[in-house]
Amino acid sequence: MSKVKLATVWLCGCSGCHMSFLDLDEKILELIEYEDRFTDVNHVELVASPVMDVKDVPECDVLIVEGGVANDEQERLISELRNRCKCLISLGDCAGFGTVPMLRNLFTLNDVLKRAYEDTESTEVGAVMGESKELPKLRDKFVPIRELVKVDVHVPGCPPSADTIYYVLKELLAGRIPKLEGQFLRYD
């Protein structure tokens, strides 16, 4: 029997989807101890997550991605991660459709940066935005991950419920593609 390696990452989003993942509570332990004699799965190993101190996401069987892509570092990362996983789950509406972070696409990148770094109420009068080598370069437009890489399963919601996340993972572990309908298909 084999272990299923599970990883989660957070790109440009609010972390609400990861909060729902953590709301699995004791069901996380059920997933870790999951066994299926039909699919040859013997336990799930969480190999990377924003709540762990893991610098690089290793190869994994299932990757859960929250948020979309707003900068060149995230674009590089999602491409690399797609190549390191067998199944990619886009978790939440930002990852799937763009939603709130995509509102910045209504403005030019220069206007967005000017508002964020020069025209804020807390910015010193006369301050001018400068370049920074520490900050990744923003993309001209925010995009959901499906526009850059193949997504195997999308879990909608803002955020999706813990029960929906649990259902999706259990279905995948059992070798089935989850059918999101009824209580599992919510757009809050």
Image (tube, grey):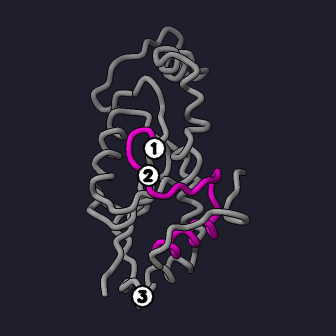
User: Residue 71: x percent and y percent?
Assistant: 39, 33
Which amino acid is tagged 2? Val
Q: Label 3 to label 1, Cα distance in Å?
A: 31 Å
Q: Indicate which disc residue 86 carries.
A: none
Q: What secondary structure is marked by label 2?
A: loop
Q: What secondary structure is marked by label 3?
A: loop
Q: Indicate which disc residue 38 carries.
A: 3
User: Residue 25: x percent and y percent?
Assistant: 58, 75
Decide: marks 1, 2 in contact (CB < 8 A)?
A: yes
Q: Indicate which disc residue 151 carries.
A: 2
Q: Label 3 to label 2, Cα distance in Å?
A: 25 Å
How crowded pointer 1 is (Cα within 10 Å; few <14, some 14-19, many 20+) is rated as some
Which corner quadrant holds the N terminus?
Answer: bottom left
Pointer 3 or 2: first along the chain: 3
The span shown in magenta is: 147-172
Pointer 3 or 1: first along the chain: 3
How crowded pointer 3 is (Cα within 10 Å; few <14, some 14-19, many 20+) is rated as few
Decide: marks 3, 2 in contact (CB < 8 A)?
A: no
Task: Examine the rendered structure and indicate whether residue 57 appears above or below residue 137.
Answer: below
Task: Examine the rendered structure and indicate whether residue 68 appears above or below residue 167.
Answer: above
Q: What secondary structure is marked by label 1?
A: helix
Pair 3/1: label in front: 3
Which amino acid is tagged 3? Phe
How crowded pointer 2 is (Cα within 10 Å; few <14, some 14-19, many 20+) is rated as some
Q: Residue at x 47, y 19 (%)?
A: 109
Which amino acid is tagged 1? Arg
Residue with the mark numbered 1? 146
Q: Residue at x 56, y 80 (%)?
A: 26
- Which of 4 and 128 lies nearest the eye of the viewer? 4
* 150 falls in the magenta region: yes
